[in-house]
Amino acid sequence: MRKDVRILLVGEPKVGKTSLIMSLVSEEFPDEVPLRAEEITIPADVTPERVPTHIVDYSEAEQSEEQLYQEISKANVICIVYSVNNKKSIEKVTSHWIPLINDRTDKDSRVPLILVGNKSDLVEHSSMETILPIMNQYQDIETCVECSAKNLKNISELFYYAQKAVLHPTGPLYCPEEKELKTSCIKALTRIFKVSDLDNDGILNDNELNFFQKTCFNTPLAPQALEDVKNVVRRNMTDGVKDNGLTLKGFLFLHTLFIQRGRHETTWTVLRRFGYDDDLELTQEYLFPIIKVPSDCTTELNHNAYLFLQSVFDKHDKDRDCALSPEEVKDLFKVFPYMPWGPDVNNTVCTNEQGWITYQGYLSQWTLTTYLDVQRSLEYLGYLGYSIIYEQESQAAAITVTRNKRIDLQKKQTQRSVFRCNVLGARGSGKSGFLQAFLGSNLQRQRRVREDHKSFYAINTTYVYGQEKYLLLHEVMPDFQFLSEADLACDVVCLVYDINNPRSFEYCAKVYKQYFIDSKTPCVVIAAKSDLHEIRQHYSLSPHEFCRKHKLHPPQPFTCNMTEAPSKDIYTRLTTMAMYPHARLRCMCTCNRCTYCLCQNLLKLELLRSIKAQLRRVVYNRSIQRLKTCLLSEENFRLTQQISDVSIVEGSICVEASAEQTPSQRHMAQTDLKNSTFWLRASVGATVFAVLGFAMYRALLKQR
């Protein structure tokens, strides 16, 4: 919407242009009328549309034609004033003023015109019969108003219509000749309908209509008002209402009706609420809200954004198979002016057996877009109507700017959910296979991917200590002499070499020594194609010796040449290293020979697990016994006392029976009791010592 409105009054001399302005300002007819009124500015709080309005008068006696042309070029709306009792002034409207204005304005940006018939107090008849043919002939004429400066008749209405012609023009919306909405208007209203159709059934039910009404006009419709609206559509269209809901045709018909009845401000209110400007294009302020991202910070979607994207996925996944077919993807992006996802997306995120984007892949692609290009993500969310549906000021409310990485390193913890891993290696080393294996594709499936559909990115979720994180893999082009800052800015680095190519590791060694030897970024060497025969590398050091010298983890064997989906263990380890770059993992292997693996296996023994379970059971039983003791009532106490009396009697009987035993028998019983007590204590002590020892060992590992 414009920030101000500039109204120019033109016409023949003595038709009352200046009198109209003076009567509006003083609210009375002036006794003396000057040749020309000075420019007047009406404050925003006085006008109905809350917009400052400038009113400019033109006098042929005081101004030149050049000044007139300048005023025409600056005007937002032009009022052509004629006298209803002067036929010559009416004729001049078509013979002089309209051609003059059209010659001085561009055809693509015509200025709206308003015909003003002044001095209606001097005649008893209306001039509308003469004016209507003129209005039908010229499309730029918005309306005609008959008024009287002397009687103050329709003075305020005149300037209200002039202001309305600028703020709510009919031209972009409606074609009077064909009596239907223009194509650009239909396109905009169709997007608004699809955004408001929350369940994507092609119908606006009562709840969706109320949500739409509240969103645009801040008040819901009463049930009877809803029925009245639908009844109006039913009387004029056969397919405007379906299943007691408003169809797209009915929605468009209502706005056509509003415009035909002179209520086009209603349609403009809807359009502007959904982000459209006067040219029916989404504004830059709506699509690209301001968001500041400091250096060393990243951008991620927050919880509300993921909930919104989940609802969008659910409403377009019509077959409920947790995947989007190509038709469902097209339907989802019908609210976009272009198709944002290309065929490479299917090789960037997880897909099902049919190659359709899964729910996890769908969220991963949005996460990738937000991480790499937050402005593009804001634009996409704007097309989907995030700020409208979630009642936010802008799409920026869906974005979280993470903390500076330096602070994360200082505090040795991070709150980020997306981590970037740059994958470097010589040509043919297996980088693309490493990326595709992250998405669950083996070598056989990768060979079916077309060359022009390949992607340099792969993103998927991993779980680190029970937390879901996104790992973004980026394949960097193999040119170590010209690596850009974007190629080096990451959370973890993968150096991939082909064990079957003797010159493959040399590239990894040179890249590491030139860019990462003094960097704090964790590095991992991947020995790709481990299913093939390993050949000695043509480098001064073997890969194992190189890693040992530079205190790196040993090369990790990797292959995707298998029938089942490749393992994701290596990707989980990469995410862990990205999350905790300050902590050096002692081991990344599963050799079962090194100290780390032996200790880990010992901690996982069934014996230790059973001992832990028994200790928990003992503690649990004692706590239950104490609880029961505390909850005993007085009656239970009496019952317990009676039972104890009985036990005393039983004890006396046992004593008499034991008195009958021989001394040797009694001595053996006491000896067995002592031996069993000793071994019980010894076993419990050893168990506790072992558990505490391993607990301390694990604590020391975590500190390292």
Image (cartoon, rainbow, N blue to C red):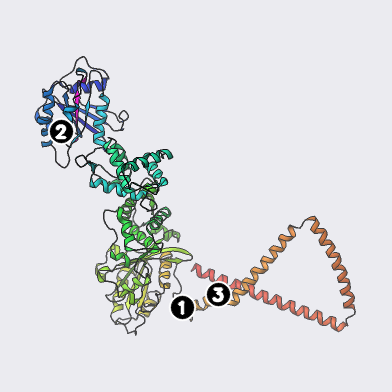
Question: Magenta span has 265?
Answer: no
Amino acid carrying label 2: it is: Ile
Mark with earlier residue (2, 3): 2
Alpha-carbon distance for marks 2 and 1? 82 Å
In-front residue for pair 115/483: 115
Where is residue 646 drawn, in percent x and y? Answer: 86, 66
Question: Magenta span has 115?
Answer: yes
Under tag 2, what secondary structure? helix
Q: Mark 2 points at which residue?
A: 72
Q: Name the residue under label 1.
A: 590
Residue 681 left/right relative to 701? right
Number of the label disc, if any, that sits on residue 446: none
At x 36%, y 82%, the residue is 531
Alpha-carbon distance for marks 2 and 3? 87 Å
Residue 334 in view of the camera: yes
Residue 637 left/right relative to 500? right
Amino acid carrying label 3: it is: Leu
The answer to the question of whether label 2 and label 1 lie on touching residues, with beta carbons closer than 8 A, is: no
Which residues, given as a range, are shown in magenta?
106-120
Where is residue 268 drawn, in percent x and y? Answer: 29, 40
